[in-house]
Image (cartoon, rainbow, N blue to C red):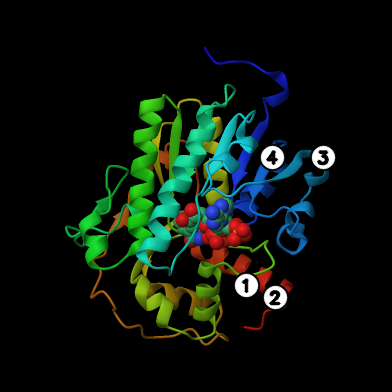
Amino acid sequence: MEKKNPGTERKVCVTGAAGFFASWLIKVLLQLGYHVTGAVRDPGNSRKVAHLWALEGAKDRLQLVKANLCEEEASILPFWDARASFTQPVQFLLFSQAEIIDPTVQGTLNVLRSCKRNPFLRRVVLTSSSAAVRIREDIHSSSVLDESSWSSEELCERLKLWYALAKTLAEKAAWEFAKENHIDLVTVVPTFIIGPILPPGLSLTASDVLGLLRGETQQFSLHGRMGYLHIDDAARCHVLVYEHAAANGRYICSSSVLDNHELAARIAKRFPWLPIPKRFDESYGKVPAYTFDTSKLLNMGFQFKEIEEMFDDFIQSLKEKGYEI
Ligand SMILES: NC(=O)c1ccc[n+]([C@@H]2O[C@H](COP(=O)([O-])OP(=O)(O)OC[C@H]3O[C@@H](n4cnc5c(N)ncnc54)[C@H](OP(=O)(O)O)[C@@H]3O)[C@@H](O)[C@H]2O)c1
């Protein structure tokens, strides 16, 4: 039977709290009245965490604790009395195989080991990635990828897609650990996240998008075809699958799937004064026009924001931060 502790009913923990996505998730959780413990590597680094303290409700309901997810002991404390752990182990997009795979898989398992010791824990919500779903040999132009789809580890290795391999192995390891240890795990599988930026610097993905708006093609040429998602939808989906008692398994979270040329045409129409590229290399060959089946979320009443709103909000926040585009 679930243990009750009134003090922890609305208490949740978010790892990697100062990052691009986690910061927005914390903003949404605070808006909804949650008490949030944010785990960061250096809570004393005021440059990195000031944006969290500036959030509405932070002074009363946010605490920041130190945790390096790659060190098991260090990750235990923050989670001991939270009802939920929103965990999104580390984002290393461009690193080598050794630098990304072990930290991502072990970081995930360390958080789950900590969660296992928490008698009040109700659910762990893990942020996976569409990279754990869409790297497959058998994709064709009418493929509809749903929660049953997993990226091929062999193909990820062959193409040296270490981020995709790390996210695939980490999510699989999480499912195995949760099953063995009777942890209520739900995973959210977001596509490429765009929207307003809270942290002071740009995450890797945000700087890729800024590059695109400035006319660069290199990073987006690697993307080929991709699903896109507003950061606010990503956050609200995490909260939904935590709050919805019957939620279970994986949830693909994606608004539109577009190839580079379709994406560029939509943005160029919206922002005709920007030097949006017209042509991209097809680094991995022509990617078939797959889509994602998001009916699992849609059937829960979830609605996705469109590409235009993602870029409106992203560009607005770039301007507020003083970036030139
Ligand atoms: N952005 C996207 O488009 C996207 C799409 C799908 C899924 N995701 C997933 O969402 C998550 C967050 O992505 P993001 O774009 O928000 O990345 P991000 O801005 O780079 O944030 C990652 C955070 O992880 C923290 N971190 C890294 N190594 C750590 C460690 N050993 N211990 C504790 N914290 C550590 C970083 O902390 P420091 O500030 O100390 O460096 C940073 O705050 C990732 O799991 C990613 O795979 C992202």
Q: Residue at point 41% right, 82% down?
A: 218
User: For the residue labelled by badge 2, is the local secondary structure a helix, a strand or a loop?
Assistant: helix
Residue at x-position 72% and y-position 78% = 322
| Residue at which label 1 appears | 315
Q: Are marks 1 and 2 in contact (CB under 8 Å)?
A: yes
User: Can I make out residue 27 in this image?
Assistant: yes
Q: Which residue is mark 3?
A: 60
Which label is found at residue 319?
2
Gap between marks 3 and 4 measured at Cα: 10 Å
Residue 50 marker: none
Tell which quarter ligand 1 is in: bottom right
Disc 4 residue lies near ligand 1 with CB under 8 A: no
The tag earlier along the polypeptide, 2 or 4, is 4
Q: Amino acid at mark 3?
A: Asp
Label 1 environment density (alpha carbons within 10 Å; few <14, some 14–19, many ≥20)? many
Q: Tell me the amino acid under the disc marked 4.
A: Val
Q: Position of residue 164 (x, y in %)?
A: 35, 59
Q: Residue furthest top?
A: 1
> Which mark identifies residue 36?
4
Per the model, the C-alpha gap separating discs 1 and 3 is 31 Å
- Classify mark 4: helix, strand or loop: strand
Q: Confirm or reject: label 2 Cβ below 8 Å from ligand 1.
A: no
Identity of the residue drawn at 49% across and 84% down:
276
In the rendered image, residue 58, in percent from the top left (x then y), is placed at: 78, 46
Looking at the picture, tell me which residue is in the foreground, 130 or 116.
116
